Image (cartoon, coloured by chain):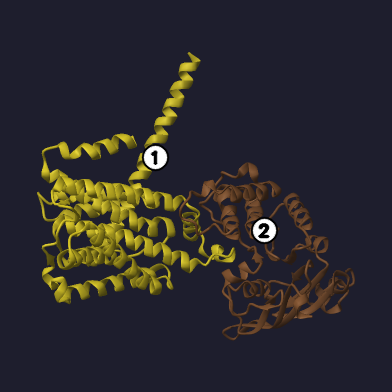
Chain colours: A yellow, B brown
Amino acid sequence: MIVLVLVLLVLFPLLPSSYALGVLTDVLIFGLFAMSLDLLLGYTGLVSFGHAAFFGVGAYVAGIVGIYGGPEIYFTLPAAIIAAALAALVIGFFSIRTAGVYFLMLTLAFSQMVYAAAFKAPFAGGSNGLAGIPRPTLGFGLGFADSIAFYYLVLAIVLASYWTLARLVASPFGKSLRGIKENESRMRSVGYNVQRYKLAAFVIAGAFAGLAGALRAQFNFFVAPDTLYWTTSGIALVMVIIGGAGTLIGPALGAALVQVLQNLISSYTERWPLLLGAVFILFVLYAPKGMIGLLEQRKQVDQETSTQQAKSANAL
Amino acid sequence: MTCLDALRIDRLRKNFGALAALNGVSFAVAPGERRAIIGPNGAGKSTLFNLISGELTPTSGSVFLNGADLTREPTYLRARRGLGRTYQRNNLFLNLDLFENVRLSIQRILGTSQNILRPADRFEAVNQRTRELLRQMGLLEQRTALAKNLSYGAQRQLEIAIALATEPSVLLLDEPTAGMSPAETNAITALLRDLPRTLTLLIIEHDMDVVFGLAERVTVLHYGEVISDGTVEQVRNDPRVMEVYLGVTTAARV
């Protein structure tokens, strides 16, 4: 199954549709963004409503470094990642002191501050956004300007990020985050410095969001301040929840569903958020474990029927 | 003298608004001692434990663990200094399996909990210690069950296992046998009795059989004050205890 998906992803550019390739690139980028939020929402139990801040900081920094510095990938992506991580360190430092709805509101307030700053900053293009962002290069005349080459770059980065995040959540550190999500006060009473773990998770999630933002800016050659707007944080939460929080791959599937729906429906009607809202409500009410939950149910049913078939075959 | 005490409480006070839940409580517990804290409901026993473990901050007074003043330290640092506790109401990781519930404590004390590079399953020393403790507690067979699916008795045992796994030098047990059947109560009492003397135990308990079966000394709290403190015999014969705790009318029979 995994191999099949990988093969399809690798062979996809053979299709002659550049539109579909663009959608898939966006799916991968938002998949990474949603996975980074899942580290907070699904693993640490932190409902951040400000994840757009790090996506946006990554996008703007990759843009500014690309335009004023140079398009080399060795500078643009690390700069975006580091800037997003630093922003997460500052915002996280204050936000993790609170919990629940206060944490949600504080992260929202911080991200709206970043939005307001980008909206006014002349070097960031102000309300017009930042245009003319170059695709990354490797030097020696090599680069990812071409959309197929850029797609493969995004695919490689997203797969490597998934692998890294999957290892992270399986590590003792990741298990500690799960413990914090389950029962924060008990973690304290067995000696965990819970605040430090939360801050570390927040910074790591911010860094991966920044990487996604940088790729998004390079993909579109452009960043709008809207990237930082709270609706971006909201759509990321929707992706995580529709896909299945706490599974990493689920939020990536959620991102795919949301992106594909948006692209399919927005060509017919402006009101695609209405349909997205309906889909979201259906998932929350009838499939709270998201798309991954549905797939697992399916698998269990399949297994049960196959064992039953095996039994009846034995009986014969 | 101070440094000889495993735990010393000095004039500890806790006010909730106008109510003094704890009104200047002082006592000391020697290393290896088994101390019971008894008293009627609302006497301030759980408040006392919350102040010792740092989950509440005192209005005034101090807490010393092995001679070190912990009064201003956060809960997690107190735990690292060797203070463990269990809760009156189960305080578990309900959606994690039993093994993981205990492994979280073990990986913390073995110092691997911040590792991000290797899967947790590959830390053999951590897993080995977790299995050993679960075997000792008689929980090993159920290690893959989610904590929320365990029987109440097993959850109660897990509550103790999580605390024991941090290898505390002082362990606070808040009604460890609350809600258990007589057989389960006996099993827990036996398990606690077998704990090594390197460990100091403070037990809040309502079951007098457990108190008299485990404790050497008893501290009696009433309305936030210590009204009696001594050996089991002394406390049993203390007229004030009979008066407020056991009831005047039954004093003759005690």
Residue lying furthest front: A140
Which callout, 2 or 1, points to the residue nearer the camera? Answer: 2
Q: Give the image location of residue A244, x and y in percent.
A: 36, 49
In the rendered structure, find residue A296 and report the number of the disc placed on it.
1
Q: Quadrant of the N terminus of chain B?
A: bottom right
Q: Residue at x 75, y 70 (%)?
A: B38
Which of the 4 image quarters holds residue A212? bottom left
Q: Residue at x 46, y 26 (%)?
A: A307
Tell me the element at label 2.
helix
Tell me the element at label 1.
helix
B6 on left or right of B87:
right
Q: Residue at x 34, y 49 (%)?
A: A162
B42 on left or right of A1:
right
Q: Give the image location of residue A161, x and y in percent.
A: 33, 51
In three-dimensional space, the C-alpha distance between marks 2 and 1, rounded to whole angstroms, equals 36 Å
The chain containing the residue under callout 2 comes to B
A93 on left or right of A118:
right
Q: Amino acid at mark 2?
A: Leu
- The residue where tag 2 is placed is B164
Q: Nearer the viewer, residue B90 or B98?
A: B98
Asked if residue B115 is positioned above or below residue A191 in the image, the reply reads above
Q: Quadrant of the C terminus of chain B?
A: bottom right
The reply to whether residue B56 is visible in this rendering is yes
Decide: few, some or many residues near mark 2? Use Cα within 10 Å; few <14, some 14-19, many ≥20. Answer: many
Q: Are marks 2 and 1 on the same chain?
A: no
